[in-house]
Amino acid sequence: MGTRWQRQKRRKNGEGTWKLVRFADDFVVMVNGTRAHAEALREEATAVLAPMGLRLAEEKTRVVHIDEGFDFLSITIRRMRKRGTSKQYVYTSPSRKAIQAVKDKISAKTYRSTRHTEPDVLIQGINQILSGWANYHRHGVSKAAFSAIDSHAWGRIMRWLRKKHSRLGMPALRRRFCVRGTWQFAANGVRFTGASAVPVTRYRYRGSSIPTPWTPQPVQAPS
């Protein structure tokens, strides 16, 4: 299904078309057709993999409609109506499981057993976790998720500081561990930046322009 003309010809004949999105041993096949077309293609994929000693993982293999959405590599892919319009687009966003996983990491990082850590070391560690996570998800619809995760992290850091320095009241805690006039945590020159510091940049679809091992190479004339 490498060209638009191939897809148009199959649609005209009532056949399904598809595109393959691959990543290591995980892949998604997007079918333009009926559920029967998708299930038939799944059986074809099973038959192709069998001679190589490979098989589809039944617990991870699903046939779903794009409007229902699905998770792939910690990203939820789903077609929805754009707010304020009647048009529909396919959106990608961090999956609920991925959001909960990074929140759990922050919770573990700020557990009571870590109170011996210096505040600047704690803040730097949390920044690194959130920066790496946000850079992976920055090409999707992620601003709301970034904000929610930062709010969770801010609350965990505040609770951690209050327990570690229980003798300090809130005004004193703010003067000591926040940038002046704000509630942004800082210690020894290290500021809490969070996931929102990573700009969201939408991924540009490059389609068949991405080179693959099957991309035809131009024939060079003999010299």
Image (spheres, grey):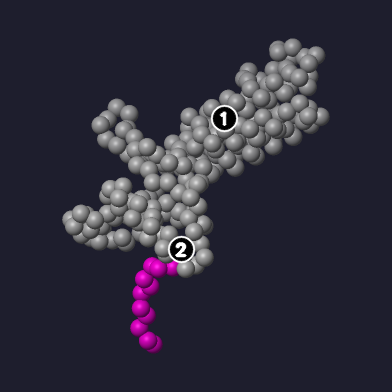
Residue drawn 33% across the image and 55% down it: 40
Question: Circle 2 is placed at which residue position?
Answer: 49
In the image, the segment drawn in magenta is 209-223
- Going by the image, does 149 lie left or right of 12? right
What element does badge 1 sit on?
Answer: helix
The numbered mark, 1 or 2, whose residue comes first in the sequence reads 2
Residue type, mark 1 in image: Ile
Q: Tell whether label 2 touches label 1 (CB within 8 Å).
A: no
Let me know if residue 193 appears in the view.
no
When the figure is inspected, residue 60 is found, relative to residue 99, above or below; the finding is below
Task: Place residue 68 in its image quadrant.
Answer: top left
- Is 153 above or below relative to 135? above
Question: In which image quadrant can residue 209 be found?
Answer: bottom left
What element does badge 2 sit on? helix
Observer-nearest residue: 145 or 62?
A: 62
Badge 1: residue crowd in 10 Å (few <14, some 14–19, many ≥20): many
Residue 176 image offset from top left, x and y in percent: 74, 20
Q: Residue at x 48, y 55 (%)?
A: 56
Left or right relative to 85: residue 19:
right
Q: Which residue lies furthest to the left in this view?
A: 12
Residue 122 vs residue 18, the one in the foreground: 18
Residue type of the residue flagged with mark 2 = Leu
Seen at 38% across and 67% down, the residue is: 215
Which circle marks residue 149 in the picture?
Answer: 1
* Quadrant assignment, res 170: top right
The residue sitting at 27% across, 30% down in the picture is 85
Q: In which quarter of the image is the N terminus?
A: bottom left
